[in-house]
Image (cartoon, rainbow, N blue to C red):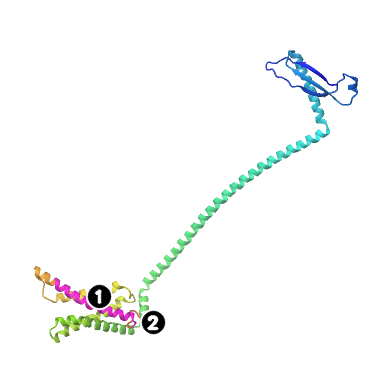
Amino acid sequence: MPTTIKLTLVPFPNPKTLSPVTLPITSPISRRACSSSRPRILIVKCNNSGQREGSGGNLKDALAGMVDKQVGELLNREENRVLLDGLDKASQRVEMAKKELAEIEKQELEAKQMRDYINQLESQASEVAECQRQILEAGEMVEEAKRSLGLNVDGIEDGDAFLEKESEEIDRNEERVESVKAALISALVGTLAGLPISLTQATSSSELILPLTINFISCALFGVTFRYTIRRDLDNSQLKTGTSAAFGFVKGLAMLGSGPPLELNTGSFLSHAFDGAVYVSENLFLFVFASVGLDYCFKMKLLSPFPIKKSISR
């Protein structure tokens, strides 16, 4: 039969209420209870109602001893030992897992640092490749400059030989023939273009001989010069116009100079200016027609521009 023992503890400066503690004990109160093989339950209820301090301390010691004894018995049991061994093993596995986790974190940190380092190396590698490409381009430019400089130096040193070689490639006889053809075409076109102007200035047929002859010779010289000036640049209109203007101004001013001398008065200045403008305009008209005729012959392949190579002529 379970027996309840009610004990009273002397309160401490900070009183605490102790909960009831139930302990398995064997009570020798009755023979029937003693003959039973099952352990009895001892219920101890502690209150903080008026006991002395000494008796309270003894009771706590007794209870602590009984609890330690019961705990020791529980720990010494075989099934509890298996649980404790499992608990120890589980704690060891937890420790190992913590160590492995720390090692994994360390490896992840190292891997991250390695990736950052690799990215840095890749960026540096791209910069190095760009620098190498620029160096190669600069080297190619230097080589090209050396080659051009070498060609220029060779051209300067061998200028005479180059001119001799070029002159050998030119067929001199065909060049003379083409120059004569250019002179004749220019002379005929220019003389015909200037014929109306000469007719307005001459009163008889004998007076036409000198201006027509001068126009013929001037236009013939203009045709030869035009061919050697234009060469193969047949689409350069500025060069064509400049050549015609140069001949027109030179011949017109020469005609003005053969007239009466200039006097220091306004009338003489105006007269010479008007005559000069007329003479220059007439000769510009003359040489422009001659240049148009030559250009037409060049484009129609009736006349060959300068120079004519031997390979081309053949």
Q: Is residue 43 above or below residue 296?
A: above
Residue 60 locus on image (x, y percent): 76, 19
The disc labelled 2 sits on which kind of residue?
Answer: Ile
Decide whether the magenta segment is chiefly helix, strand or loop: helix
Residue highlighted by disc 2: 312
Residue extending furthest toward the front: 1
Residue 110 position (above or below residue 48): below
Question: Is residue 88 found left or right of 251 in the rendered image?
Answer: right
* Res. 244 mark: 1
* Quarter containing the C terminus: bottom left
Front position in the image: 166 or 94: 94
Residue 304 falls in which quadrant of the image?
bottom left
- Considering only vertical position in the picture, is 1 above or below 115? above
Residue in the foreground of this view, choosing between 262 and 154: 262
Q: Quadrant of residue 176?
A: bottom left
Which SS class for mark 2? helix
In magenta, the rendered stretch is 273-301
Q: Residues within 10 Å of mark 1 (few under 14, many from 20)?
A: many
Three-letter code for the amino acid on which mark 1 is drawn? Ser
Residue appearing at x 61%, y 46% in the figure: 110
Was residue 227 drawn as part of the magenta stretch in this picture?
A: no
- Answer with the quarter of the image where residue 246 lies: bottom left
Q: How many marks?
A: 2
Residue 9, numbered label: none
